[in-house]
Amino acid sequence: MDRRRFVKAVGAGVAGLAAGCSAEPTEDGSTETTDDATDSPTQSGTAEGTVTGTMSGQTPVLRVGTYSSYVDAPSTSPGPWLKEQFEAEYDAELQWFAPEGNMDYFLQRRQQNVTIDTDLFLGLTPENLVKADRETGEGDSLFTSVDTGDLSNESHVVDDYRFDPQDRAIPVGASYISLVYNQNLLDERGIGGPETFDDLTSEPYEDGLLVPNPQNSETGLEFLFWTVDQFGEDGYLDYWSDLMDNGTQVLKDWGTAYDAYSNGEAPMVVSFSTDQVYADRYDQDMAEHQIAFPNGQGYAYLEGAAPFTGTDKLDLATEFIDFVLQPEMQAEIAERNVGLPSVDNATLPDDYYDFVHEPDEIVSFGYDELMGNVEPWLNDWSQQIASQ
Amino acid sequence: MRLARVAERVGAPALGVVTLGLLGVMFVYPVAIVLVESVQVPGGYSLAPITAILTDEFYFGVFAQALSDPAVLVRSFPDYRLGLFGFTVYQAILSTIAAVLLGLPGAYVLARFEFPGRRTVRSLTALPFVMPSIMVAIGFVATFGRNGVLNTVLRSLGLPTVELLFTLKIIVLAHAFYDAPLIARITAAAWEGVDAEMTETARSLGASPLRAFRDVIVPQLLPAVLTGALLTFIFSFMSFAIVLALGGLSLATVEVWVYDRVNQLDYQTATALAVLEMLFSLALTYAYLRYEARQRATSAARPAERVDLFGAVSKRRLFAWGYAVVALVVFVGPMASMVLASVTGSEGLTLRNYQFLLDRQADAYDFQVKPLTAVVNSLLFGGGTLLLAVPMGVFLAVVSTRNFRGRKLIDTLAMAPFAVSGVVVGLGLLRGFVFGTEAFGYRFTIAGPIAIVAAHAVGAYPFVTRNVAPALAGIDDSLVESARSLGASRVRVMLDVELPLVVPAILAGTAFAFAISIGEFDSTVILASGGTSYTMPVAIERFIGRRLGPATAMGVVLLVVTGVSFVIIDRLGEGSGFGG
């Protein structure tokens, strides 16, 4: 366990290439974290010259991977608050780690046979899980199952939100993908918000819709799934052909699409049904932040927490998930992340639902529907849109 | 004195070793470990993945069709299907033309006119280069969008509005926004070097002004213009973020597909595409360098006098003023829109976004991004990059002006950092350094500041080389020979005679190298992941949310900090005794 660390210059003749370089013994092709997972091989403190050592006899450290806006958004993010709450309750230190690439970062470590060095991932979507499983192959997994018996509030998880039959990913948050539209712009056309998918391909809504690119954006990808659900595997491409003919634009990512929408480039954008929370917070014109659920549906955007295979802190990771699932935590996280709780017994302030809209019907593809399908769906779609 | 001799003697070889070592470690190695996947098949190596792309209509359109059915070239003429590669080349050609058209008048104004603040304007020409693509996208939507500044002005003047967004036009314009200033700067440096006497001689021999321009000036500017055009073409050819943000997926380029294939973990297709991109860019570079080698412009003994921009109306002044208006719209517009966005909110004028930056600085947790740290990091990395990239770039420029077999090949390969897909470089840095490399039972990892500086230097030195090499080649051989005959060593001649003559070129290269470092995002965000080595572009990306205010405020900080830096770099360079 006494893992020694060396800081040495790498690259003969390259003067001064010392800081930030490290070398540590490898354990014969082992792909799993075999000792303290917080002994990060690369990042921790390289800039300051401090190195996280092993933690024998000290407060255990739980290293949680997530996406960056969960811990560092310009508005509010639940990360800092959650860390304080967890550390107050448990004798443990919570260390956030939000690498570029989110889950893919860890999957790439796994592909390259490098230790994961992180205990669990928070913010895992169903398509993330499917992608990881596709890559690791049968009988192996990047993530490990949680004993749901240890999760006191697990029975309250909304059934529609469960997406992993193997209980590796436990749903810890949700929101709905919907259309957000600008009624002021639609007034100029003399129409109201779109009510059906067919509206989007009709003449009054021409040049009306902005979609984040499903290749780079979970929001866009789940909207694509939604159209597959609506029109079937054999019909979604025809629908998209009509959408594109009607002047739909597929832009780089959610941020780009939303920016163009905010500038009035188009009256509709694929975004989230929580949009009015922000509009209210920043005193924006509500007419520019209307929510539409085509065909009365919304696609559930789900986020799970899943421990990495090979963590030596599975118990602590389970305790963390248990903690996050508590009703009061769920309520507070939902508010801070501007989303919805994943459990049905969290109590949010009455006026919260004034601005968070919910569809009549929830659409969402679970693990079994997505397994083996995401790649062909997306590839066929991409080639159709980009063919020149 | 003897020590100086020793330093002279080992200096050049040492610089060579450092340059090659850094290139090997920070570029060749990480790129090679990724690109090898393009030819790796179960049980060995094969070119099949690459030929599969070459014969796929989606990628090569009519060219792929013609492989099996040559008649298609006749049948479908002229309505060819371009394929992803064809379209990418097409938009890069348009972008290059636009950048040259926008850049050349700029060079003319900068080189031939005198006006207050001219040197500052010249220093700031590198500014578009530091703008992260996300900021350019925001600035362009705010300027050229349906409700952008341009259309608002047109509407208030009762003029018809323009629909630019989500079209090829806006992509071409955005590429020109990035690259026209580069062309202007390189060409202006060459223009300032045109000897007035030659033009005067031509005129005295009866040549019309136009004729004198065509026969005397144009040949001397051509290498610089073509250098700029080549760089513009390669950058536009490899463009990704701008294309997707302003044009949309319907106008996808090859690099968009490289990124997508990496996202889908289909490394084979991704790397095969990247190899084809690289071969194409390098072939083009090689062809250009063959041309450049045949050009031998001589630099000025006496530059022509500048014309005062202010004065009686004349054709050339009208032209200069007309250009200033265009430049204001295209270059200043998007940046000004960003400044405007940073000080406006739903309540009207506000400093709230800057207050946000101050609050973040004061309250951010360790795992959050602090604005000031980002500023300091950016400047440190930018400075570090210059310390590495300028000597490296000048060294390679010197090497490229020596005559030896295979010179052009080395010269071409020196441009490789521009020719390799940024996505591939990022992937290589992630695997090779962040994840580390196993050797001798140890796993070596490199991350943080040093790795970032090295990665920036690798991405920046080709600018220095491409600026300095043509200038060095243009030095009159008799100068060097006479210095040699007076007993000066070759290194002495280089340091005392040749380099001082090319200071404007070195400065231009330095400014762009600095700009590359400040604006770099892809590699930085990978090498800084999870640590505290984040830079201003990373902070901007982090501050993007439902409202753009905080991100645009950080964008303004980026512009101001780098703008001031550019002016300081240029003044220091000019103050070094060589004159600018």
Image (spheres, rainbow, N blue to C red):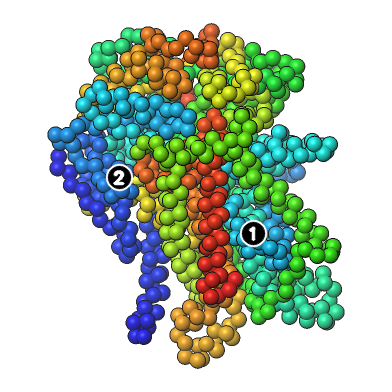
Residue B121: mark in rendering: 1
| Residues tagged by mark 1 and mark 2 found on one chain of the structure | no
Look at the picture and state if A187 lies above or below B454.
above
Classify B89 as above or below A288: below
Q: What residue type is labelled 1?
A: Val
On the question of residue B426 being in view, the answer is no
* Pointer 2 residue: A45
User: In the image, what residue type sits under mark 2?
Assistant: Gly
Label 2 sits on a secondary structure element that is loop
Q: Which of A291 and A111 is in front in this view?
A: A291
Residue B151 locus on image (x, y percent): 75, 37
Residue A119 screen position, x and y as percent:
28, 30
Residue under the point 66% across and 15% down: A193
Of A153 and A331, which appears nearest the observer? A331
Front position in the image: B97 or B123: B123
Q: Residues within 10 Å of mark 1 (few under 14, many from 20)?
A: some
- Tell whether B15 sits left or right of B124: left
- Disc 2: host chain: A
Is B544 positioned to the left or the right of A47 in the image?
right
- Residue B379: x percent and y percent? 45, 54
CA distance separating discs 1 and 2: 41 Å
Chain identity of mark 1: B
User: Regarding mark 1 in the picture, which secondary structure is present there?
Assistant: helix
Residue at horizontal 60 percent and vertical 24 percent from the top: A284
Q: Residue A381's quadrant in the figure?
A: top right
